[in-house]
Amino acid sequence: MRRGRSGGRAAGAGQSLAEFALILPFLVVIFVAVIDLSRVYTTILSIESAAREAADWGSFQSSNWIGDESDPSSNRAKTVEGMIRRACTAASDTPDYEEPLGTVDHATCTNPAFAYELLPVVGDESTCTDPEREPPCRVRVTLTQTFRLMLPLSISLRDVEVGFPSELTVIRDSVFALSDLAIPEPSATPTP
């Protein structure tokens, strides 16, 4: 008789379905964790690129750092405004990017947070506006992005968090030397 054989297949299929139901939640968690890891990695790259973009903008011409930042018509205030705009524009494609309501063309953002500083090699910051100084001053831009995970794997046991956090903080900075490049006049030699 062959009845026993078909009954074994049904039991085997049921066992496979039960095993699959047990392993499926773990597979989903691993899949979402891989996606979150890739989101963190691309956010790190984007924030680093945005910091580079802003520092590069701030490093052109030491005369851009003349004036008081609180005076909106000063070169310094306009330079800082341009650095913030470039950092926010470059970071605008990241997850969890935030800017205040009514902001036009990424003029400012709150996530990532923007900070900068002029780094004189010798002396104080006032020497940074002198184009003849040696060695040149440097501009450091720091961006801080708060990244929220899709699937935080943590539990709270008696006021103690165990597991992975629900947020990660990504901090990236970039330093560029101020440059006062003079473009030479073209020579008057005729070309054949």
Image (spheres, rainbow, N blue to C red):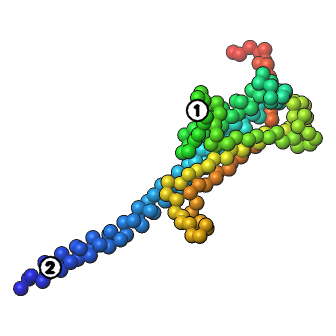
On screen, 20 above or below 52?
below
The kind of secondary structure element at disc 1 is loop
Position in image of residue 186 (x %, y %): 77, 18
Q: Residue at x 78, y 14 (%)?
A: 188
Residue 146 is marked as none
Position in image of residue 10 (x %, y %): 18, 75
Q: Residue at x 63, y 37 (%)?
A: 109
The kind of secondary structure element at disc 2 is helix
On screen, 164 above or below 130?
below
> Quadrant of the rendered structure where residue 82 is?
top right
**Callout count:** 2
Tell me which amino acid carries mark 2.
Gly
Position in image of residue 18 (x %, y %): 29, 72
Q: Is residue 155 visible?
A: yes
> Marks 1 and 2, how far apart in space?
66 Å
Label 1 vs 2, first from the N-terminus:
2
Q: Which residue is mark 2?
A: 7
Position in image of residue 157 (x %, y %): 57, 70
Q: Residue at x 91, y 34 (%)?
A: 127
> Quadrant of the rendered structure where residue 141 is?
top right
Q: Which residue is mark 1?
A: 101
Tell me which amino acid carries mark 1.
Leu
Horizontally, residue 74 falls left or right of residue 158, namely: right
